Image (spheres, helix red, strand yellow):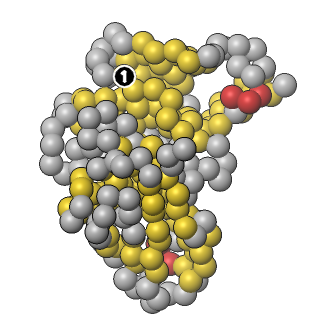
Amino acid sequence: DAEITQSPRHKITETGRQVTLACHQTWNHNNMFWYRQDLGHGLRLIHYSYGVHDTNKGEVSDGYSVSRSNTEDLPLTLESAASSQTSVYFCASSESGQRIPFFGPGTRLTVL
Amino acid sequence: EDQVTQSPEALRLQEGESSSLNCSYTVSGLRGLFWYRQDPGKGPEFLFTLYSAGEEKEKERLKATLTKKESFLHITAPKPEDSATYLCAVQPMYSGGGADGLTFGKGTHLIIQP
């Protein structure tokens, strides 16, 4: 069955380290998104991509980057992790026509 | 700026006690309003999309409705397995600035007691 997966599911890192969170989908969706979820804020859009080599900033993009080299993957990189980036990160994908985002299981990131 | 406000923040019901969750929104132009269910430690699970005022959709004990300013998620005769956080989100009509990305409310945490 087609699906969307995220890895790792849990990650603990130290302030200042570079961290990359993986997102892989097998639906062949053009659109992919990264959100973070924090208590009191709900889900907020970090970055999104509408296709290979396309990337765009979302509402809370500072300190994050993405790259899209193929349809299936959109890795999220924290260039220099900060304690404020401790959060649960969700990847989502949607097809261009239906435009309904389907979410992955999430990655819980702790920055010490 | 698109905004979504959900109420109440938390709701505790007895099994079989019907109720409604509210989602008020402001958006420059609405392409779609989405409802998701989220269980602890999991990603949001898609429930419904509504596209125009007056539209209704049903799934088992859930029915979602839409007006020009708000949406309701009606839960009829709920069971303990309906306990979850219910998220509402809007997708704007116009492209640019993440048009396919969603703006979410903070959710309603629903507990159904047996």
Q: Is residue B3 visible?
A: no
What residue sits 34% from the left and 73% below the top?
Answer: A64
To which chain does the residue with label 1 belong?
B
Where A9 falls versus A90 (above or below)? below
Helix, strand or loop status at disc 1 = strand
- In the rendered image, the quadrant that contains the N terminus of chain A is top right
Q: Nearer the viewer, residue A4 or B101?
A: A4
What residue sits 36% from the left and 49% below the top?
Answer: A28
- Residue lying at the far front in this picture: please name it: A1
- Residue lying at the far top in this picture: please name it: B54
Q: Quadrant of residue A14?
A: bottom right
The residue under label 1 is which amino acid type?
A: Leu
Q: How many neighbours does mark 1 have within 10 angstroms: few (below 14), some (14-19), or many (20 or more)?
A: many
Going by the image, does A17 lie left or right of A28? right
What residue sits 31% from the left and 37% below the top?
Answer: A99
Q: Nearer the viewer, residue A102 or A89?
A: A102
> In the image, residue B93 lies at what x, y percent?
19, 34
Judging by the rendered image, the residue that carries numbered circle 1 is: B50
Going by the image, does B97 lie left or right of A25? left
Q: Nearer the viewer, residue A99 or A112?
A: A99
Q: Quadrant of residue A59?
A: bottom left
Going by the image, does B84 lie left or right of B59? right
> In the image, residue A77 lies at what x, y percent?
39, 75
Where B48 falls versus A27 (above or below)? above
- In the rendered image, the quadrant that contains the C terminus of chain A is bottom right
Q: How many numbered tags mark residues here?
A: 1
> In the image, residue B83 lies at what x, y percent?
70, 33
Where B59 falls versus A36 (above or below)? above
Going by the image, does A58 lie left or right of B42? left
> In the image, residue B27 lies at what x, y percent?
24, 34
What residue sits 24% from the left and 56% below the top?
Answer: A51
